[in-house]
Image (cartoon, rainbow, N blue to C red):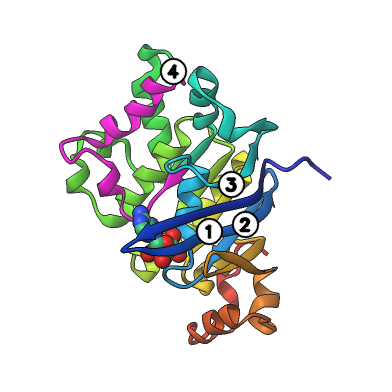
Amino acid sequence: MTEPLLEISGLSKTFVSGGRRVSAVESVSFDIRPGETVGLVGGSGSGKSTLARLLLRLTPPESGRIRFEGKDWLDLSGNALRRARARLQMVFQDPLAAFNPRATVADVLMDPLRIHGTVVPAARPKEVERLLERVGLPSALAERSVLDVSGGQRQRVAIARALATRPALIVLDEAVSALDVSVRRKVLELLVALQKENGLAYLFISHDLAVVRAVSHRVLVMDAGRIVEAATASRIIEDPQSDAAKALVRAVPKLESENDAAT
Ligand SMILES: Nc1ncnc2c1ncn2[C@@H]1O[C@H](COP(=O)(O)OP(=O)(O)O)[C@@H](O)[C@H]1O
Ligand SMILES: [Mg+2]
């Protein structure tokens, strides 16, 4: 067996708001192997985004460990952290929230190349062109404002930006949820194709089991901060065990087998 790329054990995060304690993430443990897509599915408020933010070190956990590429991820700092960050990237539902509204597409892609020193300055324009090509966008898009491209194109730019630092793992939090069905399908196909080319791993987060099923090798079901079920998407759909999984299956009116890209 290959070594896990990411190993999470006993991860917990509690929020206190209005005098009430919320266990957003509670004793969560799982692994992701190189080149694997793990789907994380759960209803609204089940703790998916908090888990993603803990993974990206956007918020600190109360307890638990994260190992990434053989290193204790929560202990890294300075240059070692910066190098490791290049290997763990994220794509959100709304890339505009993460982009400077005055930026061009080229600016958005140049930033990580500069910050992480991925390629020498003279090679950056060519690298931007190559990144656009990899996500199926024309190089002419580079000069456009990020406000002046479609939602689907913008999400492809966000994926290109994540790819810029040559990551081993991309966390996608509701990354296709705002896209309409045909655009969504194309972006999912792109993710699968990029994985085949590069051996990337994904943590693919969505509230929609049908979307998760289309790309995931394995699925984790989250409910009230805990992982309550872990199996292949087909097994969960055919024979859900937990109440949370049963509710997610019911929420999908008709699961179409032709969406199955990963299995
Ligand atoms: N910054 C915060 N302060 C207080 N409570 C929070 C905060 N972030 C998330 N929560 C709470 O944690 C729980 C999990 O939220 P979240 O991780 O966003 O769930 P999901 O992404 O699955 O919808 C919810 O009850 C939410 O209200
Ligand atoms: Mg969320």
Earlier residue among tags 3 and 2: 2
Residue ID for mark 4: 117
**Mark 1 is on which residue type?**
Val
User: What distance separates the C-alpha of mark 4 from that of mark 2?
Assistant: 34 Å
* Distance Cα–Cα, label 3 vs label 4: 33 Å
Q: x, y percentage for residue 225?
A: 53, 64
Q: Looking at the image, is mark 3 or mark 1 earlier in the sequence?
A: 1
Location of residue 160 in the rendering, given as x and y in whole percent from the top left corner: 41, 40
Label 3 crowd (10 A; few <14 / some 14-19 / many >=20): few
Judging by the rendered image, the residue that carries numbered circle 1 is 25
Q: Are marks 2 and 1 in contact (CB under 8 Å)?
A: yes
* Residue 214 appears in the picture as rendered: no
Q: Earlier in the sequence, mark 4 or mark 2?
A: 2
> Which of the labelled discs sits on residue 63, or is there none?
3
Q: Name the residue: 22% across, 49% down.
A: 149
**Range drawn in magenta:** 90-118
| Residue 114 image point, x, y percent | 37, 20
- Of the image marks 3 and 4, the number of the one nearer the N terminus: 3
